[in-house]
Amino acid sequence: MQKILQISDELFWGYNMIVDLDNYKSFEELVLTIKNDLIKFLNMNNLQILKEKAELLNLHYHGYDKYEDLYKTNEMIIYICGHC
C-alpha cells in the first residue's frame, strides 16, 4: 500500500516521498527513510548547511498507535513531525 511521507517541520515542511508500506515494518523505519532521503537530496545539491540541520532533526510521528494503523486510515499523507 502506497502512502506519502511528508515532513512537518519549520525548515523542511513539505519535503515528501512516496513509500510502499509493505517494504517497512515500523514507524522508526519510515522516519529513518525520509530523514536519510532528505539528507541525500541536500547533499546531492550541495546544500551543506541545510544538510547539517537535517542531520540534527528529531523526527517522529503522531496519531497512530501501531504501524498496522497506517493500513486502516484513508489518509494518503503521513506527517512526520520535527516540531516538538
Image: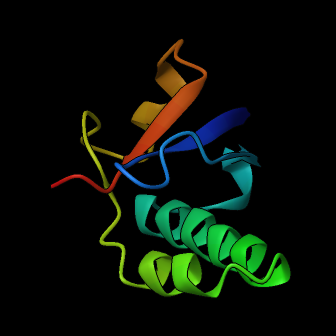
| Image coordinates for residue 44, horizontal then vertical, percent | 84, 81
Q: Above or below — where is 20 with respect to 33?
A: above
Q: Is residue 30 left or right of residue 81?
A: right
State the image quarter where residue 6 is shown. Answer: top right
Locate residue 38, reporting x and y percent.
Answer: 65, 67
- Point 44% across, 38% down: residue: 79
Image quadrant of residue 42? bottom right
Residue 20 is situated, as x and y percent measured from the top left of the image, at: 75, 46
Label total for image:
0
Q: Residue furthest right?
A: 44
Taking the image as shown, residue 66 lies to the left or right of residue 84, namely right
Q: In the picture, which quadrant includes the N terminus? A: top right
Q: Nearer the viewer, residue 17 or 64?
A: 17
Residue drawn at x 49%, y 35% as measured from the top left: 78
Quarter holding the C terminus is: bottom left
Question: How far across and how far down the image is residue 3, in percent?
Answer: 67, 34
Q: Seen in the image, is 43 located left or right of residue 35? A: right
Foreground of the two, 31 or 2: 31
- In the depicted structure, whether residue 81 falls above or below residue 40: above
